[in-house]
Structure formats: C-alpha cells, structure tokens
C-alpha cells in the first residue's frame, strides 16, 4: 500500500486476514482430529464447504446483533458454546494432539462467562473482544 493511505484504512485488512487465518487453523486442527480417528481429510473439507453459504448469512446476522446490542433469544448460549469449547480441548487431548487452538477459544469463552455473559447469544463475545487490557496483562 502507498504511504498516502491512512494507517486506519490499512488496518481494515487485518480482520479479514485474521478470520481467514483462524479458518485455516481450525481446518488444520480439524483435519488432525479426523486423521487421528481414521477419517479422511476430504470428508471434513466437504463438510466445512457445505456450511460456507450459511456462514455468510450468519456473519451478517451477528454483525447486525452487535450493532443493535441485541444478544437475546439465542439458539445456543455462550455457556453452551463454552461447553463445546471444553469438549474440543478434551478431544484433542484424547487423540494426543496439541490443544492450543481449542484451548485459546475456551479461554475467550471462560472470560465471557466470568463477565456474566453465560446466557446471551454468541455475538455477545464482542464485549470480551472490546475489553481493554492493561499493558501488564499477557
């Protein structure tokens, strides 16, 4: 990018890149789990691809919920998702795989629960993402 592009505009590329990287890391972790259980990676890739059209719709819905601050009437609560994240850690450990990625997701979920966000919809995790950390925190 040219030096004339304001820093704020250049930073707009960061969220899609982080999203893409997280998606790839999730896929790689999922493939490792599948392989450890004798399931071909192509099966997981097909399953993930089948969800892609729905993902786009959900992204728009979650952005709208965040804009409105409307986290009521969830299909699944943050507490439910936190339980799923704990299960993902268990699966990785049971299969002798690294648990860094599911553990990181679980840490975010636990911070949400600690902030009293157990019952709202998953989009309420934006409150955890918006929370400022002190410079001393890791």
Image (spheres, grey):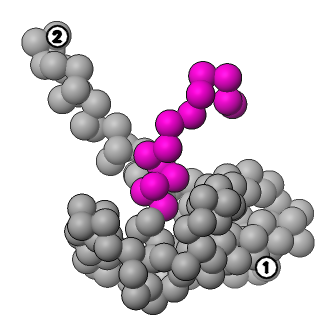
How packed mark 1 is, by other alpha carbons closer than 10 Å (few <14, some 14-19, many 20 or more), is few
The residue singled out by tag 2 in the image is 3
Element on which disc 2 rests: loop
97 or 112: which is nearer to us? 112
In this view of the protein, can residue 3 be seen by the observer?
A: yes
- Location of residue 91 by image quarter: bottom right
The residue singled out by tag 1 in the image is 37
Residue depicted at x 47% and y 72%: 122
- Location of residue 93 by image quarter: bottom right
Q: Is 18 located above or below residue 65 in the figure?
A: above
Element on which disc 1 rests: loop
Q: Give the range drawn in magenta.
A: 125-138
- Location of residue 33 by image quarter: bottom right
Q: Which of marks 1 and 2 is nearer the N terminus?
A: 2
Residue 46 spot, x, y in % from top left: 46, 80
60 or 49: which is nearer to us? 60
| Residue 94 located left or right of residue 119 | right
Residue 20 spot, x, y in % from top left: 41, 52
Q: Kindly give the residue lying farthest to the front in the view shown.
A: 116
Residue 58 spot, x, y in % from top left: 31, 76
Residue 96 spot, x, y in % from top left: 89, 63
Q: Which of marks 1 and 2 is in front?
A: 2
């Amino acid at each position: 990018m040219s030096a004339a592009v304001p820093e704020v505009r250049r930073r707009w590329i960061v969220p899609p890149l982080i999203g893409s990287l997280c998606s790839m890391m999730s896929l790689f972790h999922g493939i490792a789990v599948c392989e450890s259980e004798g399931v071909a990676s192509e099966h997981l890739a097909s399953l993930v691809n089948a969800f892609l059209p729905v993902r786009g719709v959900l992204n728009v819905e979650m952005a709208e919920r965040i804009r409105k601050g409307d986290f009521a009437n969830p299909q699944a609560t943050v507490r439910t998702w936190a339980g799923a994240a704990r299960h993902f850690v268990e699966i990785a450990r049971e299969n002798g795989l690294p648990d860094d990625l599911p553990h990181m997701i679980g840490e975010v979920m636990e911070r949400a629960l600690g902030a009293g966000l157990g019952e709202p919809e998953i989009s309420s995790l934006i409150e955890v993402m918006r929370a400022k950390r002190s410079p001393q925190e890791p």
